[in-house]
Image: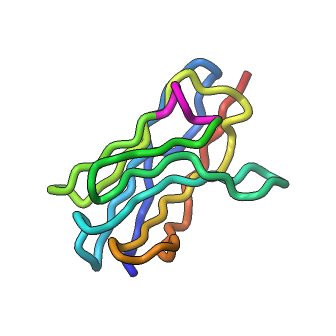
Amino acid sequence: QVQLVESGGGSVQAGGSLRLSCVASGGTFSSCNMGWFRQAPGKDREFAAAIYWSGGSTYGESSKGRFTISRDNAKNTVYLQMNSLKPEDTAVYYCAAYMRGTSSWNSWGIGTLVTVSS
């Protein structure tokens, strides 16, 4: 497992943008598959985006076209650029990871709150 620390959350008006960052430590970052999940009040945790050790990426339905995930292996950091934010994007955003060769998200950060006002 790796240790993950998120940052970049905050309050923004609808239509605005935020960039979340997640710094990983304690593992070989370039071999990690990295992801972002979110959990809104009273709702289940939802997949937002993932970027794999190979460089490929996938997005949840609510993220497509507005969010972009990227990684900087030299900085052990994964980013989530969020544009055209909507009030329904309000949630705690969690960074997650799993190592190449495994198959389940087994490392989690403590989350960062994003609040989008209308």
Which of the two residues, 106 or 104, is positioned nearer the viewer here? Answer: 104
Give the magenta part as a residue range.
Answer: 62-67
Q: How many marks?
A: 0
- Image coloring type: rainbow
Residue at the spot 67% in from the left edge and 47% down from the top edge:
91
Q: Is residue 14 above or below residue 99?
A: above
Residue 64 covered by magenta stretch: yes
Residue 27 image point, x, y percent:
27, 77
Looking at the rendering, in which quadrant would you find the C terminus? top right
Q: Is residue 110 above or below residue 74?
A: below
Q: Would you say the magenta stretch is mainly helix, strand or loop?
A: loop
**Toward which corner of the image does residue 81 lie, by quadrant?**
top left
Residue at the spot 33% in from the left edge and 71% down from the top edge:
100
Q: Is residue 108 left or right of residue 24?
A: right
Residue 101 image point, x, y percent:
35, 76
Residue at the spot 28% in from the left edge and 79% down from the top edge:
26
Which of the two residues, 3 or 71, is positioned nearer the viewer here? Answer: 71
Residue 56 image point, x, y percent:
34, 47
Looking at the rendering, in which quadrant would you find the N terminus? bottom left
Residue furthest to the right in view is 42
Residue 103 covered by magenta stretch: no
Residue at the spot 46% in from the left edge and 56% down from the top edge:
35
Residue 89 image point, x, y percent:
67, 36
Residue furthest to the top in view is 15
